[in-house]
Amino acid sequence: MKLQPLEFEKPIIELEEKLADLKRHSRANDINFDHEVLRMEGKIEETKRAIYENLTAWQRVQIARHNARPFALDYLQLSFSNFIELHGDRLFAEDRAMPGGLATVAGRKCVVIGHQKGRELKENLKRNFGCANPEGYRKALRLMRLAEKFGLPFVSLIDTPGAYPGLGSEERHISEAIAVNLREMMVLRTPTVAVVIGEGGSGGALGIAVADRVLMLENAYYSVISPEGCAAILWKHRKHAPEAAAALKLTARDLLEMGLIDGIIPEPMGGAHQNHAAAIANLKAAVSGALQELTQLPHDELLARRYGKFRKFGEFAGDA
């Protein structure tokens, strides 16, 4: 797949095109431009560092939504192994927006579930653009209980703009399904790890994110509302999404500073879509490291730490 550059990446693309032209001209005319090529390559690296080391919140949102980023099934196939998909919530239907099942990560058996988007329209329609219905969250709950029953850790991969808000979803009680998951994940007697791999939108993300370790990829975002939704409410226009993104403090760095997540998984220069192999290896190492630590804890201590962590959310210190 040819990568489509984001607006702020265009200076890099222009330099890379000039470098390609220079190399073609060198070959066609048998002229040695090695010095100029090295200088241009250095300028490209310098420009990349200047851009990617100073990304705004809105730019990170754009990277999080990039169509070429690894999706949940990419990680399941390459970070995990022996993936066996399990279907259905045993109540209504199979939700293809949230695949899950049994897998192995770094030699450790686990149960895993995640939001899945599509890269083309047909796949997006099949996956409902990564927006799960109530049956997706009830399938997740079924798999959580399966993990608890067999003493397996539970891992979730989060990448959704939000739970599906359609009429059928409301009729089948989407808010109740998410609320039940929040309650049950808090008391689940097995280690849990959640990773925001792209978009972490509102309750749709939180419904599988009440975990002992909540991790985020470097350019993912996690927010109570999308920047566009926030802008439409506060500024009455979606054009203010960049300002909303900054105000929402939705980046991994912001959330780690506030203690709302437990760690950041680094991405390759330019984002996970630039180098799938590096992103997948980083996620595998982070998840296996977290599970190695959590599986050493007795269940009672695990639950006490989980409760204490989430109980602290919303506490603020200020002048009396």
Image (tube, helix red, strand yellow):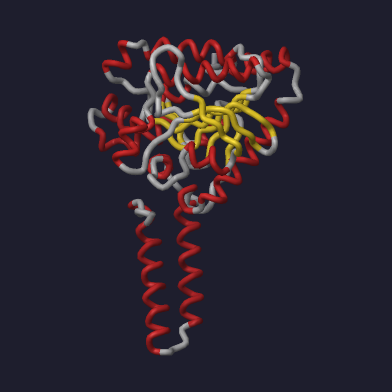
In the picture provided, is 183 more to the left or to the right than 247? right
In the picture provided, is 148 more to the left or to the right than 88? right
**Residue 253, position as x, y percentages in the image:** 53, 37
Identified at 72% across, 12% down, the residue is 300
Does residue 240 lie above or below 314 as drawn? below
Question: Quarter-wise, where is residue 18 in the image?
Answer: bottom left
Q: Is residue 316 visible?
A: no
Along the viewing direction, whichever of 310 and 144 lies nearer the viewer: 144
**Residue 201, position as x, y percentages in the image:** 41, 28
Question: Quarter-wise, where is residue 162 in the image?
Answer: top left
Does residue 131 lie above or below 20 as drawn? above
Identified at 61% across, 11% down, the residue is 187
In the picture provided, is 155 more to the left or to the right than 13? right
Does residue 3 lie above or below 66 as drawn? below
Identified at 46% across, 65% down, the residue is 44
Viewport quadrant of the N terminus? bottom left
Does residue 221 lie above or below 178 as drawn? below
Identified at 36% across, 43% down, the residue is 119
**Residue 308, position as x, y percentages in the image:** 64, 15
Q: Is residue 313 visible?
A: yes
Q: Residue furthest bottom?
A: 30
Along the viewing direction, whichever of 232 and 173 lies nearer the viewer: 173
**Residue 157, position as x, y percentages in the image:** 51, 32
Q: How many marks?
A: 0
Viewport quadrant of the C terminus? top right
